[in-house]
């Protein structure tokens, strides 16, 4: 190790923070060990190989302005709000030592009188309840270990956003491992993310400073505005990265309209509807038989699908049924 540094982002945009983290990984200066601390405003972060529709309630996310982000590491889906803080260790492979990194977090907890415990491969718990989920990435010469810390987060939000809607789904890909969770503030009165930041800094100093030299702290440094970070931002914010990468899945949506019951069986690949089977007991079977062309090869995205249905050039009674379908799809909000 040549030197250590601490980087703090005060911005709360998850796509930007993930871009900064990825920039740190891609541009790693030889021999530098970085601790990056960051927070996100209301966000669900899914793992690299996850299906967003299976992991969270997409329509609720949309309605309540919760951002969906996908990260470069594997593992499950977590919720971040202002009561959650994230840490990232970015370093050359030869300096990577998960035990040492976890020790930084456990010692940070000790400073607050909290006895954290490593559980399984990825979690840190207290009293058997999880307050930190961790995930890892290994490039050819650089490693990333990042994790969450639930400090004083709104647990009702966490639960409701990470509960998928009820549609029946068959899907491949990585499934999250639901745990009992807790806030660290339950173990230290008045705890907030500023105190945690301070304690993380102290703990990292103790573990990584060389010859008792202070480790420098960079808050929103100028290089945050580099072109390369904007480029990564474009990817992180893009529909293709967040949804298009979703695993293959089959999903069934069903509803009863006054004119009959409708079942839509979608086969989705890379977030595009590849095939659809539509069943209905509606009297107008001709209408039902003509429906599939409106869905096949379209994005699996409620808004654009609903618009597409509404714009279809049909008249009379069938137009009303089409509008009913469009309204319902919009309401489903996938
Ligand atoms: N913020 C947060 N912290 C800890 N645990 C959480 C959190 N949100 C949800 N959960 C619980 O973890 C499981 C999912 O556990 P699972 O083990 O499936 O996934 C993880 O832990 C992934 C951690 C990723 C950490 C990254 C660090 C920076 S960006 S995100 C979920 O169902 C909840 O029960």
Image (spheres, rainbow, N blue to C red):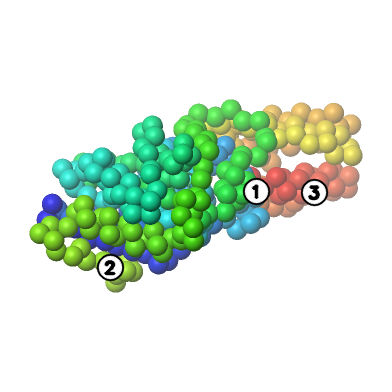
**Crowding at mark 2 (Cα within 10 Å: few <14, some 14-19, many 20+):** few
Q: Nearer the viewer, residue 315 or 179?
A: 179
Q: Which residue is mark 3?
A: 323
Q: Which residue is mark 1?
A: 59
Please identify the residue farthest to the front as the structure is shown.
Answer: 113
Q: Nearer the viewer, residue 213 or 138?
A: 213
Question: How many angstroms separate mark 2 from mark 3 (CA)?
Answer: 54 Å
Which residue is at a point 62% across and 49% down the rendered structure image? Answer: 156
Image-quadrant location for residue 264: top right
Question: How many angstroms separate mark 2 from mark 1 (CA)?
Answer: 38 Å
Tag nearer the camera, 3 or 1 = 1
Which residue is at a point 65% across and 48% down the rendered structure image? Answer: 59
Q: Mark 2 touching mark 3, by CB under 8 A?
A: no
Q: Secondary structure at mark 1?
A: helix
Sequence-wise first label, 2 or 3? 2
Residue 25 picture location, percent across and down: 27, 52
Please identify the residue farthest to the left as the structure is shown.
Answer: 211
Quadrant location, the C terminus: top right
Sequence-wise first label, 3 or 1? 1
Which residue is at a point 10% across and 59% down the rendered structure image? Answer: 211
Sequence-wise first label, 2 or 1? 1
Residue 62 picture location, percent across and down: 62, 54
Which residue is at a point 13% across and 61% down the rendered structure image? Answer: 212
Question: How many angstroms separate mark 3 from mark 1 (CA)?
Answer: 19 Å
Tag nearer the camera, 2 or 1 = 2
Asked whether residue 304 is in view, the answer is no
Q: Which residue is mark 2?
A: 218
Residue 301 picture location, percent across and down: 61, 46
Q: Is mark 2 within 8 Å of ligand 1?
A: no
Q: Nearer the viewer, residue 132 or 260?
A: 132
Please identify the residue farthest to the bottom as the structure is shown.
Answer: 222
Image-quadrant location for residue 93: top left
């Amino acid at each position: 190790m040549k030197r250590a540094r601490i980087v703090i982002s005060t911005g709360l945009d998850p796509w930007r923070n993930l871009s900064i983290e990825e920039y740190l990984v891609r541009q790693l200066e030889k021999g530098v060990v970085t601790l990056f601390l960051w927070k996100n405003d209301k966000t669900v972060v899914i793992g690299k190989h996850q299906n967003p529709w299976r992991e969270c309630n997409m329509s609720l996310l949309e309605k309540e302005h919760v951002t969906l982000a996908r990260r470069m590491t594997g593992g499950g889906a977590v919720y971040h709000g202002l009561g959650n803080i994230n840490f990232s260790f970015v370093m050359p492979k030869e300096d990577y030592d998960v035990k040492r990194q976890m020790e930084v977090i456990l010692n940070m907890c000790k400073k607050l009188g909290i006895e954290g415990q490593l559980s399984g491969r990825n979690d840190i718990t207290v009293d058997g309840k999880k307050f930190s989920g961790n995930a890892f990435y290994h490039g050819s010469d650089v490693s990333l270990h990042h994790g969450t810390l639930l400090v004083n987060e709104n647990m009702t939000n966490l639960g409701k956003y990470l509960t998928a809607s009820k549609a029946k789904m068959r899907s491949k890909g990585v499934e999250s491992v639901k745990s009992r969770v807790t806030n660290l503030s339950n173990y230290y009165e008045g705890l907030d993310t500023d105190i945690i930041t301070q304690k993380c800094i102290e703990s990292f100093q103790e573990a990584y400073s060389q010859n008792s030299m202070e480790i420098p702290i960079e808050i929103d440094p100028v290089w945050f505005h580099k072109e390369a970070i904007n480029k990564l931002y474009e990817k992180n914010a893009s529909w293709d990265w967040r949804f298009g990468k979703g695993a293959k899945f089959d999903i069934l949506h069903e509803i009863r309209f006054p004119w009959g019951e409708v079942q839509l069986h979608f086969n989705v690949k890379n977030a595009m509807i590849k095939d659809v089977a539509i069943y209905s007991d509606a009297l107008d079977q001709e209408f039902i038989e003509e429906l599939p062309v409106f869905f096949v090869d379209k994005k699996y995205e409620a808004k654009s699908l609903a618009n597409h249905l509404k714009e279809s050039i049909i008249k009379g009674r069938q137009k009303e049924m089409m509008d009913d379908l469009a309204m319902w799809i919009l309401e489903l909000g996938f």
